[in-house]
Image (spheres, rainbow, N blue to C red):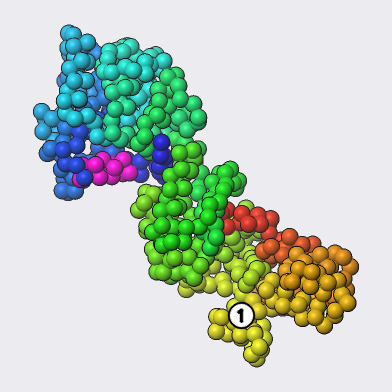
Amino acid sequence: MRVIVCENYKEVSKRAAEIVADQLNSKPYSVLGLATGSTPIGMYENLVSMNKSGKIDFSSVKSFNLDEYYPIKRDNDQSYHYFMNEHLFSKVNIKPENTHVPNGETDDPQKECDLYEELIERSGGIDLQVLGIGQNGHIGFNEPGTNLCAKTHLTDLTDSTIEANSRFFEKKEDVPTQAITMGISSILKAKKIILLASGSNKKQVVEELMSDSITTNNPATLLKVHPDVILICDKSACSYYDLGVDIGGTAIKFGVVDGNNVVHKYKVDTNKDSSEALINQIVKEYEKITKEYPISKIGVGVPGRIINSLVSSSNLPFDNTNLKQELSLKTGMPVKVENDANCAALGEALAGAGKEYKNIIMITLGTGVGGGIIIKNKIYHGRGDAGEIGHFAVNYDDDKTPCPCGLTGCFEQYASVTALVKLAEKYANDNKDSLLYKLYKENSKLDGMLIMSAYDGGCRIADEVLNEYVKRLSVGILSLRNIFSPDVIVLSGGITSRGDVLLQKLSNVASLDIPVKISSLKSDAGIYGAALM
Ligand code: F6R
C-alpha cells in the first residue's frame, strides 16, 4: 500500500480527484467503483469542476457504488442514490443508465446482490475503486469480523456505524440497520484502489492500517493484500514522517524522520549511470519506504550547484537537471532540493549541536572545506549559492596554492584535511626520527587518523603539525565570526572525531567570544537537514 500524506482535507480531495482524472483520461471507458459518506464529497466537487472545464469526460464511464442502506427508498434524502445524484451524477455528463447503486427498495435482496455482482463482472470489472474508511475500519459496509470471501451481500450494520451515521439522520432510530454492500472479495477484484481518510477521528484506525496486521477485525487492513492501493490521508488522520535523502557520489542515504528523530535509515550505492537511472532509484526506494511510513514530504541534499531549481554536479550525472520537478512528478510528493552541505548545516542547526541557537555557521573539514550559513534557523543562500565557506582567500598572494575555484590562498587550501595531510608530510620528511615519519613510511601515506595516532603516541612533530593546522583553521573561524557574528560555530567532518584535540588547541590560539562545537549528528546531519527543510 502506498501512502500519500496531505496537508488537509482540501488536498486529499484534490489528490484523489487527480487520480480519478488520470484514470478517465487514460481509459475513457473506465469502470469506477464509488463511495458515499462525507469524505469523498470534496473529491466529487473537484471532479465536477474538472468535468465542467473540459478536463475530464464521463460520457463513456460506468460506475458502481459500493453500498446502499436497506431498506430505503431511492428518493429518501439519506439514500446513497440520492447522495450520488446530488454530488456527482446530476452534475457531470455521465449517462444515468451507466450508473449503478444497489437497489435498497428490492423485495429480494439476495437476487439484487447476485445481479449486482454479475453486472460488475459483465462490465469488465472495476478499474478504479474509491473507498472511505469507517472509524471501526469498515470499507463499504463490511464491518469488523467480515467474511473475507464475501461478494455483494446484505449485512447488518454495527452499533458504532449506526451511531456514526446517525449524524445524517434526524434521530438514531431512523438509521436503517442493514445495507447491501459489495463484499471484500468484490472490492479486492478492482484493478486499483484509492482509500481516503481525513480527520483525527480516523487516526486510530489508519494507524492500525499502517501496522503489520491484516485482520478481519479491521476490514480495511485486508486491502494490504492488494497490489495497487493508495491511502490518501491528511495529517490529522495519521502519524506522518518526513523523508530525508542525502545523495552522495558513492552512496545515497535515506532517513525517515519523525520530528527530530530518525526512526529508520539505510543507504544504497549511488546509481550514476544517468540522471534518469538515479532519479528512478530514489523513487523506487521512496515507494518501498512509504509502504511502512506515511511520508508527507521529501527533502533531498545533493552535492552540487542549484540555480533556479536546476542541479549540476561534478560527482553525479546531473547537468541542469530539474531534480525537484522530476521527483515530485514521479512520487506525487512535495519535494525540496538543497545543496548537501547546506542540508547538513541545517540538520545540525535544528536537531544537532546547534539546536539551542538560531544563527549557526557550520564548517565541514574534509577533502575540501564546505559548510553552511544558517540565519534565524534558515539556510542563507544569498543570490542562490552562498555558503562556500572554503572559498574566501586567507592569503591573497599565495600563488603556490591555487584553488580550483579560481582564487589563490583559499581557506580550503589551509584548513581542509588534505591541507593537514600535506603539512604533516612536510613535517615528517623534515623530521625523519619522529613517530609521525615512522607511521608515514609504514603506511606509505598519512591521513587524519595517523596524524592523531602519532599525536596520541606523544610525537612532538605531530603536535606541532596540529598546532600549525589549528592556527590556520582559527584564521578562518575568527574571520567568519567577525563577518557573521553567529551564535555558534559547528565543526564537522571525519577529523572532528578528535574534536577534543582540535577544540583544546583552538582555545590556545584564538580568543573567541562564541562557542565552537563539534557536530553531534556526524554523517546523519545531511538526512536530518534534508528532511527538516
Ligand atoms: C460509503 C461507505 C462507507 C464510508 C465510511 C466512512 O459508501 O462505503 O464505508 O466510506 O463509513 O464514511 P465517512 O466518509 O462519512 O467518514
Asked if residue 367 shows in the view, the reply is yes
Q: Is residue 529 left or right of residue 10?
A: right
Name the spot of residue 214 as percent of width and height, x first. Answer: 45, 25
Q: Point out the stretch of residues depicted in magenta.
A: 14-25
Q: Which of 438 and 139 is in front in this view?
A: 438
Question: Which quarter of the rendering shows the N terminus?
Answer: top left
Residue at horizontal 53 percent and vertical 55 percent from the top: 269
Would you name the residue on which mark 1 appears?
392
Name the spot of residue 523 as percent of width and height, x first. Answer: 63, 57
Name the spot of residue 260 as percent of width and height, x first. Answer: 60, 48
Residue at horizontal 50 percent and vertical 49 percent from the top: 243
- In this rendering, the answer to whether 72 lies above or below 298 is above
Q: Please check the rendered image and state whether residue 18 is part of the magenta-colored stretch, yes or no.
A: yes
Helix or strand or loop: what does disc 1 sit on?
Answer: loop
Q: In this view, does 116 lie to the left or right of 329?
A: left
- In this rendering, the answer to whether 68 lies above or below 451 is above
Asked if residue 170 shows in the view, the reply is no
Report how many numbered discs are placed on residues in the image. Answer: 1
Quarter of the figure with residue 83: top left
Residue type at the position of mark 1: Phe
Residue at horizontal 60 percent and vertical 46 percent from the top: 261
Q: Please check the rendered image and state whether residue 430 is part of the magenta-colored stretch, yes or no.
A: no
Q: Which of 7 and 189 is in front in this view?
A: 189
Quarter of the figure with residue 472: bottom right
Query: Is the magenta region chiefly helix, strand or loop?
Result: helix
Quarter of the figure with residue 155: top left
Name the spot of residue 509 as percent of width and height, x first. Answer: 81, 75
Q: Around disc 1, counting alpha carbons within 10 Å, would you say few (fewer than 14), some (14 to 19), or many (20 or more)?
A: some
Residue at horizontal 85 percent and vertical 80 percent from the top: 431
> Ligand 1 within 8 A of label 1's CB?
no
Q: In this view, does 55 lie to the left or right of 377?
A: left
